[in-house]
Image (cartoon, coloured by chain):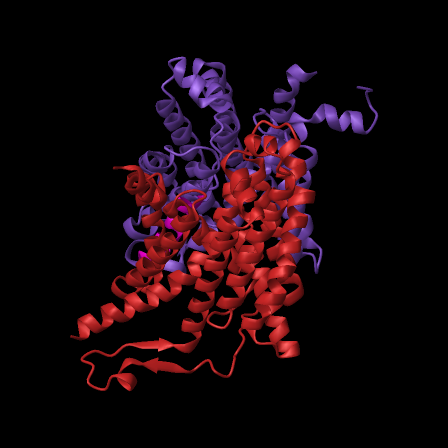
Chain colours: A purple, B red
Amino acid sequence: MKKYMPFITLGFFLIFPMLGVSTYVMHIFILLLMWTTIGMSWNLLSGYCGQVSFGHAAFFGIGAYTSGILYSKLSMSPWLGLPLSVFTVGILSFIIGLAVLRLRGPFFALATLASGEVFRVTAENMEWLTSGTLGIMLQQRLWVSKLPYYYIILSITVAVFLLMKYLLSTKLGYYFVAIREDQDAAESLGINTTLYKTIALIVSAVVTGIAGAFYMNYMGYIDPHIVFALHDISIITIMIVMVGGVATQWGPFIGAVIMVLLQEVVRSIPGLGAMHQAIFGGLLIFIIIFLPNGIVGDFKKIKRFFGLRSA
Amino acid sequence: MVQLEVFLQTLVSGLLLGGLYALIGLGMTLIMGVMKIINLAHGELMMVAMYIAYWLFTLLGIDPYLAVFIASPALFILGVLIQKYLITPVIKVESILPENQVILTVGIGMVLASLATVFFKSDYRSTPVDYASVTWYLTDYWANSPIELSISLLWAVSFFFSIMITIAMWFFLSRTDIGKSIRATSQDSDAAILMGINVNRMRSLSFGLGAAIVAAAGCLFIPLYYLYPALGGQFTLIAFVITILGGLGSNVGAIIGGLVLGVFESMTSTYIGMGWAPVGRFSIFIAALIFLPGGIASLLHRRRFGK
């Protein structure tokens, strides 16, 4: 059963739109897949390689703005942003990495957080390029139907899933885990930690950037406060993986399902909307204290709690 | 001459701002030194204190500067509770990522900020004290002065109080028994246990003290600034930049770091543009990481032991 899970899930996602669901459900599924992609990229850098990033909004935003600027300043198709963001995000994340990868643990986390904020403020102030806080809006989205967007993000998600699986089965994956467990020991075993941390950062950033470029094309509007948001992007990314399961293959997916659904539920109940940060914060505190490895990572603990299997 | 005037005025307001920043940084550096964790809810704790000061002023007419004596003890208790019931359990839990504690403080901050939004709405609030517009001009005291400088009474008072609290903290940490125990815990907690220090108690105490200090900073800030629930995040970042700039866990470093940051920020807003001040803040942060990884504390250290 476990062996066939990926195929069953993939099959479900492939035929799902043919069940004649409403556009709202399609929208939720598109968001779900997008967050799964971002979660997987964060999981590579932070879950497997141990470099906890609080600044994935920076990469998401750069990707989105690559797409947006192509459209607004160069009058080209914003879809070109998807391949192009690989280069812009790749180069910028390399530069960020030069500064922040010298740091360890919490200091790395905070330095990435700061870099996310730097990009937000820069995007707000460089009005000639980014139109500042006005943001960039697509006059017309390519498709009215959600279906093409759905299959595009589905193929991106599947590709990223396979990429992560491949990367972690190679030597690279073992290097990452070695760095997470003990950076000094890894270094003394001859692993070039700086190189591999940079690789993890760039791969992770590029994937997030592609998701950002997709977001621009799908939503049709971005401004610095949306795409460089600390709480709504960076922290949600962390929560998705923390809730789902750090350093697990399916963690980001499970986490994205829970978080996206929770977000929608909270939004749909009047009076609860203002509380959403408190609910997310409370959930985060709960997960960290009781299920520090997430739902997938601590699945045995959950089972034991419900008495399904005595320990 | 006008150029010089602008420069000096910027320098003065930068120093005044820096004095308050130093106080914010001091609380964080204390927690970081003893607990070895970064408290990302620091700004939110300050926000809570500012709301206490605001309501005391609005409902009871208590001056924000006097509110220090109520808000600080309140936040001390809140800090001890957070440490005891949230952070200590997490330190014991086995997990893949050691940064869990940092992420936990993010969660605490989110809850605090969101509850403030729910209870107090996102309105901007301020405490209009009646002496707010009093300003001293240099020409009033020295009629022939070639340049004109002004200092607002509020800023001066806040700066003065912040310096007093900093000195009191320094005295507490270096001269009293409890202060020495806290410093011993931050230097080497295992050795501190062997010396008979109740390390857990010291940790709670220092988290509470850090919260109390930032609460004092909040009370000093509120007459000068306005208050809204999301205000915490930016001050958390400021506190963190100061701690990195000053050197981790160094009190003198935090004070100098706060002053440097205040001056730097006010220079960027004068000469580059208001909106760029946060970028200036982070560029100084990244520059500190690259060129001075040990912070200002390492410079002081080098001079002391260099000979």
**Residue numbers of the magenta segment:** A113-126
Spot occupied by residue A300 in the image (x, y as percentages of width and height): 73, 23
Magenta stretch encompasses residue A119: yes
Spot occupied by residue A97 in the image (x, y as percentages of width and height): 35, 34
Residue B247 visible within the image? yes
Against A64, residue A17 (above or below) is above
Residue at image x 53%, y 49%?
Answer: A231
Magenta stretch, main secondary structure class = helix
Against A50, residue B184 (above or below) is below
Spot occupied by residue A68 in the image (x, y as percentages of width and height): 37, 48
Question: Nearest the camera: A136 or B248?
Answer: B248
Question: Nearest the camera: A205 or B128?
Answer: B128
Residue at image x 79%, y 19%?
Answer: A311
Tell me the quarter of the picture where residue A193 sits.
top left
Residue at image x 37%, y 28%?
Answer: A198
Against A49, residue A231 (above or below) is below
A291 left or right of A120 in image: right
Image label count: 0
A191 left or right of B68 in image: left
Spot occupied by residue B261 in the image (x, y as percentages of width and height): 35, 56
Magenta stretch encompasses residue B199: no
